Image (tube, helix red, strand yellow):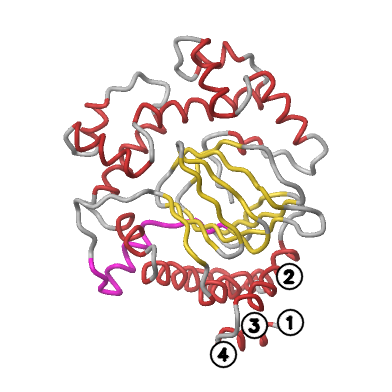
Amino acid sequence: MKHQDTNEVCETGEDLGVARQELLRTIVRHAKKDDFSMTAIPGLGLSHREAPTEQTGYIHEPSLCLVVQGAKRLLLGEEVFSYDADHYLIVSVDLPVVGQILDASPEKPFLAMVLKLDPRMISQLLVDGNLPQPRTQQTSRGMAVSRVTLSMLCAFQRLLDLLDQPEDIPILAPLVQREIVYRLLMGEQGPRLRQMGAIGTQSNQLTQAIDWLKKNYTQPLRVDDLAAHASMSTSTFHRHFRELTAMSPLQFQKRLRLHEARRIMFTDHLDATSVAFQVGYESSTQFNREYSRVFGAPPLRDIKSLRQQTAGTARVDATATGITVRNV
């Protein structure tokens, strides 16, 4: 199908399957085989995987994740979020997750896109569109799954088409990204994104506390001090933090420590005991117990398995086990 046909699909409102197939072909042309990589369009990444993956822990940045073929599952605390070609995932705040690609093969690879969400763009759209501001006392989960729409697929197609016209990217890509975010704001997940972009909301204040935790995850945690960073009382902070992240501040900090410990062991070949103390644990026994609970195996066995997974691939992305990753 040519690009003109894609426009006709979007204009006539034909079924999602036709638009999805065009997106699939475009991603196959531009994505690196069996890899996740960022494109020439700022904030846009593509994923191409030919086999299911083991569970991988990382910090998921605010983003929109759109699967075109295959399926993936994320664990946030004890909650499970599954998404596929019919459902997109939206993440409104940095969250420690464990992800796993469930459906992928050489014949039908997992193909997906991730678009990083910029709070400044959301804030500007709230102003430009004269959209209603969220209630300041409202807090919702920082991750959700919704059904894909034809307008979303068509907008992403226009964005991907710019990869064939790199000279147009600086001017046109921000416009298409703005359209995608606008459609999100006007759709089912609009209230969630408005919390992300509006100054003074509970979610916005909690984001400041999460940023502090990411920078100081090795330090002893005093919830009273963390609540002060969010300008909330301790009880209010604790309640809204759990609502946003599906875990307590202490559990959140532990996930940050464990993800970073995994990255260090994978990249620097350090033993588990040394790394445990490096990331802030006072007991190696507690570290091993919590590590096994999150990643499904003790540190030594888990890292060995991780190295076996990455052996022979074209490129080993060491950040895929740590706290700075953007992942689909």
Q: CA distance from mark 2 to mark 1?
A: 9 Å
Q: Quadrant of residue 232?
A: top left
> Residue 73 location in percent, x, y?
58, 47
Asked if labels 3 and 1 touch by Cβ distance under 8 angstroms, the answer is yes
Residues shaded magenta: 114-132
Q: Is residue 273 left or right of residue 215?
A: right
Q: Amino acid at mark 1?
A: Met
User: Disc 3 marks which residue?
Assistant: 6
Label 4 crowd bin: few (<14), some (14–19), many (20+), radius 10 Å:
few
Instruction: Answer with the quarter of the image where residue 20 lies.
Output: bottom right
> What residue is pinned by disc 2?
25
Q: Nearer the viewer, mark 1 or mark 4?
A: 4
Q: Secondary structure at mark 3?
A: helix
- Pointer 4 residue: 12
Find the distance from the CA under tag 4 to the CA under tag 3.
Answer: 10 Å
Query: In the rendered image, which quarter is residue 119 located in?
Result: bottom left
Q: Residues within 10 Å of mark 3 (few under 14, many from 20)?
A: some
Q: Which image quarter holds the N terminus?
A: bottom right
Q: Residue at x 71, y 59 (%)?
A: 31
Q: Which mark's residue is nearer the viewer, 2 or 4?
A: 4
**SS category of the residue bearing label 4:** helix
Q: Earlier in the sequence, mark 3 or mark 2?
A: 3
What x and y, as percent, mark residue 48? Answer: 71, 55
Name the amino acid type tagged 4: Thr
